[in-house]
Image (spheres, rainbow, N blue to C red):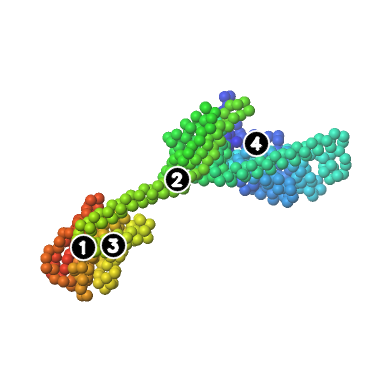
């Protein structure tokens, strides 16, 4: 029952404005009262006030269990019934509830045991949330006979005992069934997979467990159709799948299907991946009454599999590139080394340079390597005092790091053989700047032997040119000054 149902009521003969619903509530011959979510009494009609023998003004605003305390089992049953209505949004009935109430002083005071049949009905708002509970309380105590029976003052008439026994048996059976239902509901609500029940041709949500609510961002969906509850799904094909299950009477199984959900009120659509089953729910007449939805959010698994595939593809690509680089180094080193005995040392040194750069990248999960670290790995073997590095921190992509690692190795090897690092006084200076996503680096040697000829464009130079050109789009310029070689490198950076 909706709180605003009365406002929406229409009658062909009587206009809504002519119906005084408050007066109707007060005049109802059956006892009714209303409590809020905190179980405080907010309204009671005249019949209720009469049956509990208390004035309305003395009860409004008071906690129900302060007005009618009962610490025993029956008080627990009454509280549990009210809580079930708050939790489920569904009516709840106690067929027979022994419950004492205080007698007025005019009747001698004290407590009097009474027997009640109680029906609790939720009043929900537009979002389907229970705001109030209406209690219809019927006193089924036979004012003399059942009172005496309850206190053991007299025996029931023939047949009365059987009737009472049947009522108690029915109540006991109801409590057992209710307990089993509550256990099943607890399992449903706490299941790790998401579950929901859609009912009717318009596919309204009537049940949804915690996992489903978490998946959709804990939105108020109960009582709403799929399209109204989850409007972002309208153009993603899920409503059509549900309708197809209703029409075909066959289940539908989805595997790793993407669903874009707005999980926060002001957030953007978030892509989730789900495995699910849409199972048609058949009534006793064989007609489809709704669809049961069950599944799992496998987003983490799908993203992990994608990342794994990406890493494998990247590894294959890097292994092929590395093998191609090794093959090129081997061919060019063999051509540039006439003496076969000198080949192993030259080839091993260049492989070591490649390995050093790979070690730096491996330490950073092949995501990047620092420019200063790549330079230092090639120059450190000659002594910390033999070189100076100056420039801001620059993160190189794996391709940039490998290429510059080989370039710096060639420059360092040349400096050790013929340039600044071949004399005790010589040193190397590397400085760089970055502007507009371009690296400008200058390698300058000081204090080495005086150059006697222009630099030869041998394998080392060709390796430098080829490492920087191609996909990297870089270039290098060599020149000789009075105290040593200078190499200027320009390289567009992939990461900006």
Between the residue at mark 2 and the residue at mark 1, the CA separation in whole angstroms equals 56 Å
Between the residue at mark 4 and the residue at mark 1, the CA separation in whole angstroms equals 111 Å
Pointer 2 or 1: first along the chain = 2
User: Helix, strand or loop at disc 2?
Assistant: helix
Pointer 4 or 1: first along the chain = 4
Expressed as whole percent of the image width and height from the top left, the position of residue 397 reads 31, 55
| Quadrant location, the N terminus | top right
Expressed as whole percent of the image width and height from the top left, the position of residue 103 reads 78, 46
Q: Which mark is residue 25?
A: 4
Image-quadrant location for residue 118? top right
Question: Residue at left 53%, top 35%?
Answer: 278
Q: Are marks 3 and 1 in contact (CB under 8 Å)?
A: no
332, above or below 126, in the image = below
Question: Residue at left 65%, top 36%?
Answer: 25
Q: Nearer the viewer, mark 4 or mark 1?
A: 1
User: Helix, strand or loop at disc 4?
Assistant: helix
The residue where tag 3 is placed is 348
Expressed as whole percent of the image width and height from the top left, the position of residue 376 reads 29, 66
The residue where tag 1 is placed is 339
Image-quadrant location for residue 341? bottom left
Between the residue at mark 3 and the residue at mark 4, the CA separation in whole angstroms equals 97 Å
Q: Nearer the viewer, mark 2 or mark 4?
A: 2
Question: Residue at left 30%, top 65%?
Answer: 377
337, above or below 252, in the image = below
């Amino acid at each position: 029952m909706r709180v605003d149902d009365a406002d929406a009521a229409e009658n062909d003969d009587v206009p809504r404005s002519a119906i005084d619903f408050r007066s109707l509530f007060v005049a109802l011959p059956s006892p009714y009262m209303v409590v809020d979510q905190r179980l405080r009494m907010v309204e009671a009609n005249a019949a209720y006030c009469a049956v509990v023998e208390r004035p309305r003004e003395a009860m409004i605003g008071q906690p129900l269990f302060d007005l009618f305390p009962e610490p025993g089992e029956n008080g627990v049953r009454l509280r549990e019934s009210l809580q079930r209505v708050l939790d489920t949004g569904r009516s709840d009935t106690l067929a027979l509830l022994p419950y004492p109430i205080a007698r007025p002083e005019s009747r001698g005071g004290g407590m009097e045991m009474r027997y009640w049949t109680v029906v609790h009905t939720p009043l929900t708002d537009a979002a389907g949330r229970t705001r109030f509970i209406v209690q219809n309380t019927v006193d089924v105590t036979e004012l003399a006979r059942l009172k005496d029976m309850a206190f053991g003052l007299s025996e029931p008439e023939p047949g009365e005992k059987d009737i009472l026994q049947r009522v108690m048996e029915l109540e006991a059976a109801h409590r057992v069934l209710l307990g089993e239902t509550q256990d099943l509901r607890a399992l449903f609500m706490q299941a790790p997979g998401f579950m929901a029940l859609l009912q009717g041709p318009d596919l309204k949500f009537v049940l949804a467990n915690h996992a489903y609510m978490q998946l959709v961002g804990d939105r108020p969906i109960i009582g709403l159709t799929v399209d109204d509850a989850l409007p972002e799904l309208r153009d993603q094909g899920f409503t059509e799948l549900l309708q197809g299950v209703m029409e075909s009477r066959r289940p539908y199984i989805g595997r790793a299907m993407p669903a874009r959900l707005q999980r926060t009120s002001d957030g953007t659509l978030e892509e989730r991946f789900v495995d699910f089953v849409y199972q048609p729910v058949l009534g006793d007449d064989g007609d489809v009454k709704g669809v049961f939805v069950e599944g799992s959010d496998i987003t983490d698994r799908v993203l992990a599999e994608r990342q794994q595939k990406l890493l494998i593809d990247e590894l294959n690509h890097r292994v092929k590139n590395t093998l191609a680089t090794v093959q090129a180094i081997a061919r060019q080193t063999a051509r540039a080394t006439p003496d076969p005995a000198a080949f192993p040392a030259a080839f091993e040194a260049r492989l070591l340079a490649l390995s050093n750069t790979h070690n730096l990248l491996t330490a950073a999960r092949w995501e990047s390597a620092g420019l200063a670290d790549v330079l230092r790995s090639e120059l450190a073997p000659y002594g910390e005092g033999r070189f100076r590095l100056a420039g801001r921190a620059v993160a190189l992509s794996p391709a940039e790091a490998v290429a510059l690692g080989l370039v710096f190795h060639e420059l360092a090897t040349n400096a050790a053989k013929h340039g600044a690092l071949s004399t005790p006084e010589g040193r190397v200076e590397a400085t760089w700047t970055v502007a507009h996503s371009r690296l400008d680096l200058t390698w300058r040697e000081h204090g080495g032997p005086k150059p006697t000829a222009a630099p030869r464009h041998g394998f080392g130079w060709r390796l430098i040119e080829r490492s920087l050109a191609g996909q990297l789009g870089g270039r290098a310029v060599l020149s000789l000054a009075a105290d040593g070689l200078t190499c200027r490198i320009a390289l567009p950076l992939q990461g900006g």
